[in-house]
Image (tube, grey):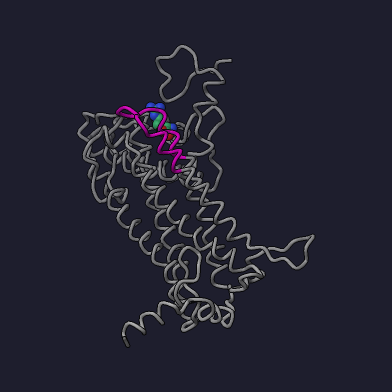
Amino acid sequence: MAQSNDALWGGRFATGPSDAMAALSKSTHFDWRLALYDLRGTAAHVKALHKAELLTDEELAVLEKAIRELSKRVEAGSFRPKPEEEDVHAALERGLIEIAGIEAGAKVRAGRSRNDQIATLIRLYMLDAADALESLLLDYIDALSSKAEEYMGVSMAGRTHLQHAQPILLSHHLAAHAWPQVRNLQRIEDFRKRAKKSPYGSAALAGNSFGMDVEMIAQELGFSSTTENSLDATSSRDLVAEFSFILSLIAIDLSRFADEIIAWATIDFGYLKLSDEFSTGSSMMPQKKNPDVAELARGKAGRVIGNLTGLLATLKALPLAYNRDLQEDKEPLFDSVDSLALLMPAFTGMVRTMEFNRSKLETTATDGYSLATDVAEWLVKSG
Ligand code: ARG
């Protein structure tokens, strides 16, 4: 059954989309999390429309008040998209018209497209996600360095090929898990420079002729400048891929320590004990303490890598400019961000509360052949 068509693009269409088409097209169930960014974009947009003399002073005042009111309702959860609404942009336009009235509300559509809107919102979302991720990473790095300090001077067997190689300090090993995350912090910093450009004003693909002040919009939204090319701005998602890659690396680096923790917590290794808070037991085997946090970290790494490779496959060979395929960028990105937001506090908590067995570690530093290199080097020096 076809619905009536009051979609943003429905004017020229005699009937609405079929139910199957509408269901396929719909994105409100995942893009609603961008609603407040959308409203921030609209607030900047109406200022630029006013500056370009497309809105009167009164209309601007009415719209700004309506945007504030709608933002409050969205935050409170009292304004939600309707089932028949296609995306976050359509639902919020309806909301704005409901509050501001059709006269002023309908004018907001001028000079922008959902293509430049979504390209802008995804950047704003990632910039906030980058801030949150940065503090999770800093907390994890702090947990590793506190542990390293707590066990300063404790030696252990360093390994290559998993075989005892040369004695090292546990603190050195723990710091070796911190450094890749420090580099991930640097990657986030570098990503920010590229992401801080505003695509707003690129419209569908080729901008608009209203002479709107896009620099002002960029500033209002906290970007440092505007994008250079409107086709690129609306159709590239390399920044989403880049951010997803950084998320993947973070997860991969966690999974490398996770795998050691899983082994080290076994009775065979006996290097460490996990706290009760960050492990689970077995209903059937009372002696067991399972390293679930570390196992879930390993598992989530696979999932996050999958999100990245799925996105890369979506981007491959897409012609310029915007194609609807690009709607598929959001769920994998959101899933990776959510996965790390869930994983990292637990992983950090596990690291903060783990206890190492000093004497067990120290015996591995001197047993077997760990000292063979030192003996050989001593022989050369004293030769
Ligand atoms: N939901 C779309 C996306 O996520 C928004 C842009 C839609 N543009 C369009 N021309 N249909 O990419």
**Residue 320 rendering spot, x and y as whole percentages:** 30, 28
Q: Residue furthest right?
A: 284
| Quarter of the view holding residue 102 | top left
Q: Is residue 220 visible?
A: no
Q: Nearer the viewer, residue 59 or 307?
A: 307
Residue range in magenta is 308-330
Q: Please name the residue shown 49% across and 13% down the image.
A: 15
| Quarter of the view holding residue 123 | top left
Splitting the image into four quadrants, where does ligand 1 fall?
A: top left
Quarter of the image with the C terminus in it: bottom left
Q: Is residue 87 visible?
A: yes
Q: Please name the residue shown 59% across and 79% down the image.
A: 360
Image check: 368 left or right of 222?
right
**Residue 287 rendering spot, x and y as whole percentages:** 75, 68
Q: Residue furthest bottom?
A: 382
**Residue 337 rendering spot, x and y as whole percentages:** 47, 50
Q: Please name the residue shown 51% across and 60% down the image.
A: 344
Residue 6 lies in the magenta stretch: no
Figure check: 332 above or below 248: above
Q: Nearer the viewer, residue 157 or 199?
A: 157
- Main SS, magenta region, reads helix
Count of all numbered marks drawn on residues in the image:
0
Quarter of the image with the N terminus in it: top right
Image check: 245 left or right of 280?
left
Q: Nearer the viewer, residue 145 or 75?
A: 145
**Residue 120 rendering spot, x and y as whole percentages:** 34, 41
Q: Residue furthest top?
A: 14
